[in-house]
Amino acid sequence: MQPSDNDVLNPGAPAETARRVPTLVVAYDDPTPRDGTRPLAVEMPVNLVYGNVPYAVMMTTPADLVDFAYGFSLTEGIIATADEIRSVAVEHDAAEGGMRLLVDLVPGRLREHLARKRAISGRTGCGVCGIDDLASLPKADAPLHGAGRVTIPAIQRALLAMGDAQVLNAETRAVHAAAWAGLDGSLLALREDVGRHNGLDKLIGALIRRGTDPAAGFVVITSRCSFEMVEKTASLGATVLVAISAPTSLAIDRARLHGMTLCAIARSDTLTVFTGRERLDLPARP
């Protein structure tokens, strides 16, 4: 059976898949910021529910969700063929800021699914491991520490040092890095891993084992900046996060929630400030 429009029982209003946000673009050779805007991919928690039993929360762009329900069900081993799904209902959950996919399985497959316990693999992708409903989505409650002001030259220095410091990536070209830089931009710690979340967890582990003061520096990551990367940085108590790639919409929302400075799309010539400009040592705009 091929999925059709009839599979979407309660679609509600179409969810946005991109959101344009205001930014400040800073060039290293001319740190006077320029106002701009940039479209960001929307990141949203989507709860997959089978037989009224929550199964998993995945972070997705809210498009083609019926296709996602079918594909996820197959790759998780919940179904073997498409005709084992009778329908998929899409529900918006405004209270939790996410969506639910209510997957109606044929009776035999549903009984088999409910009889087995999910074995959660440690994903390097976009699942939230161990979470099966929207209300349990992680949110750091550690207070952020008042870091000293960070200069643009310090961020540039840290970014330039990242390449030589990534020993495993130089050998494999297949891993992400997370680093801790002092307020002067010197790299004080760096950890690598095939999973971007794992690399940041390793870095945070090293920092708390050393008793590092979260106010004494900032975090730099080589990966895309999703909401989990912001939450992990917030759990450390750090106030400044610099990402080489772009953030998602939920990353921006969480950075604002925590009062965090988030710089992203940090390249060799420019970086873009999305939140927390007040912690950066920038000249006043003309």
Image: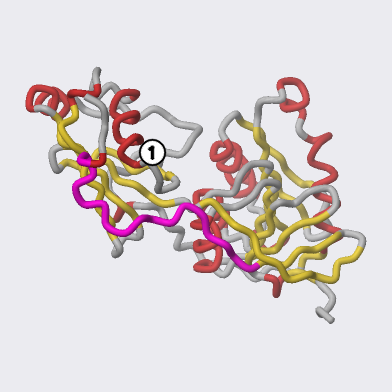
- Please give the range of residues in magenta: 6-22
Q: Residue at x 40, y 53 (%)?
A: 138
Q: Residue at x 71, y 71 (%)?
A: 279
Image quadrant assignment for residue 106 = top left
Q: Residue at x 59, y 49 (%)?
A: 225
- Residue 167 position in % (x across, y down): 77, 28
Give the amino acid at mark 1. Cys
- Residue 249 position in % (x across, y down): 52, 57
- Residue 257 position in % (x across, y down): 50, 68
Instruction: Indicate whether 282 appears above or below 216.
Output: below
- Residue 240 position in % (x across, y down): 66, 61
Left or right: 90, with 109 as reference point: right
Q: Nearer the viewer, residue 110 or 241?
A: 110
Image quadrant assignment for residue 168 = top right
Q: Quadrant of the N terminus?
A: top left
Q: Quadrant of the C terminus?
A: bottom right
Q: Residue at x 66, y 54 (%)?
A: 212
Q: Which residue is mark 1?
A: 129
Left or right: 31, with 138 as reference point: right
Q: What is the basis of the colouring in this image? A: secondary structure
Q: Is residue 11 magenta?
A: yes
